[in-house]
Image (cartoon, helix red, strand yellow):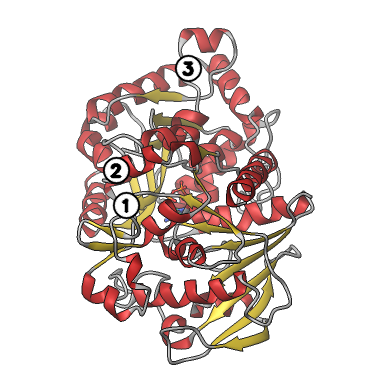
Amino acid sequence: MSLRDILFVTSEVHPFIKTGGLADVSGSLPVALRALRRDVRIVLPAYRAALQRARNTVEMTQFSVHGSDTPVTIREGRLPGTRVVVWFVDSPPHFDRPGGPYTDEEGRDWPDNAQRFTVFSRAVEKIACGEAGLAWRPELVHCNDWQSGLVPALLALRGERPATVFTIHNLAYQGLFSWDVFQTLHLPQTLWSMHAMEFYGQFSFIKGGIVFADMINTVSPNYAREITTPEFGCGLQDLLASRKDRLVGILNGADYSQWNPAKDPHLVKTYNAFTLEHKAANKAALQDRFHLPREPKTPLIGLIGRLVEQKGFDLLLAVLPQLLQRQVQVVVLGSGDKSLEDRLKRATVEYPRQVSAHIGYDESLAHLIEGGADMFLMPSRYEPCGLNQIYSLRYGTLPIVRRTGGLANTVIDATEENIANRTATGVVFDDATPQALLQAVDRALALYRQPRLWKKILFNGMQQDFSWRRSARQYLQLYQRALQIKD
Ligand code: ADP
């Protein structure tokens, strides 16, 4: 019998709440699985902002969870535009507050994150075991990142349980808490063991997923290999290597219903691979939006992302004066570390005709950058999958990326050989240094100056298919293996 009922556990889902790629995955993969005739239900904390966006939710059931005085209510909604059920775990003391899913409005971690995601995981455990009064019980529970890492651990302590899969979207975020915090969580003491969730004197939520899930995956084949090495393993490399037979990489898909230049409502002019000249109108609009002079011929480089060390924005800043001698324009959309934000702001003041930044989160602007920029730069130090390079390919915006993680799995370097055999889709560079970044941009600029070749490479990129359908099939295979291993 093939698997049908899947509970998808996540701490963010586009369009309800988003801080990064996990939200995109959570908003797309369940839909793709449903198209493959699976009954997938999403479970998400009922953050205030998420409930506001969900509007008409229906109260389904209420129950108590171990370790919390307040009962939990499950509210049911639908993923907009789909029939996928979303269950919001409503525990007002934990989730009904302003700010983001993990941090307050100032960007500081909520001091009770361990309690918040323990309550969430306890509620998920009850749903997973058919004890929540929902008249539905999954055969498999798919957990994502540290916020739901506790779920496979709690389920492993059960006799009767569904199979479990744990996906690592970013190993660097582990959910580490002290012994004192652990004591407040009312969890079985057996979990505080180096063979369970203790990690060098701290309680590690992500270890719950890695140690106890039947199968584990990351979001690209390359990152799955990288995290078993000291350079990328964040201290967990040996554990991950010991579970190599259960660890696979499945590339994230792109949601082409949202990210398609032929239908994108955020563009001033839509286009496809045969009407690339219409990108010019979007470039002009982008230059206007960023208060840069309208210069149709000046190469325009876009960057979007969380302003954190991982993403390598500092490499760009280190080389900016030399880069700008090349007569390019640079637009940046992002928010994060204050020092990076400040350095970017200073650059915009120093080079007002060439550099502009929007500090903040703006979905619509992200689309216009993809549509209007000529090149898209991702100098990440590590990148589990990365989505913007995949969007860039579809938008005919040449990706310039470091050869790491999912970037290396999705962009094919414009070497002479790859150009000749028509597989080249972007520029890929090796070292995480300002100089290597500059050389990569120079290579991209050399291609830009050869319009016919440039168009061919963009055309190759636009033909690439990273739709969710293929990845969803791979997830189904992963689920089957998890079911077999559990039995
Ligand atoms: P990560 O999950 O590490 O943040 P990904 O590339 O996997 O990186 O996903 C990031 C997603 O978030 C992309 O869809 C990207 O467009 C979006 N994003 C990141 N920062 C911003 C921002 N400031 N404004 C709009 N979208 C953003």
Front-most of 48 and 139?
A: 139
Left or right of 169, for residue 259 = right
* Among the 4 quarters of the image, the one containing residue 88: bottom right
Q: Position of residue 215 (x, y in %)?
A: 53, 47
Amino acid tagged 1: Leu
> In the picture shown, does residue 155 fall above or below 351?
below
Which residue is disc 1 drawn over?
Answer: 307
Q: Position of residue 53 (x, y in %)?
A: 59, 75
Return the residue at label 3: 414
Q: Could you classify mark 2 by the number of other residues whose Cα lies within 10 Å: few (under 14), some (14-19), or many (20 or more)?
A: many
Point out the tag, 1 or 3, that comes first from the N-terminus. 1
Secondary structure category for the residue under label 1: strand
Q: Which residue is mark 2?
A: 313
The amino acid at mark 2 is Phe
Residue 138 is marked as none
Q: Are marks 1 and 2 in contact (CB under 8 Å)?
A: yes
* Identity of the residue drawn at 31% across and 34% down: 229
For the residues labelled 2 and 3, the Cα–Cα distance comes to 23 Å
Kindly identify the amino acid type of the residue bearing the numbered disc 3: Ala
Who's the residue at 62% across and 24% down the image?
459
Secondary structure at numbered mark 2: helix
Seen at 38% across and 32% down, the residue is 404
Badge 2 or badge 3: first in the primary sequence: 2
Q: Is residue 203 visible?
A: yes
SS for callout 3: loop
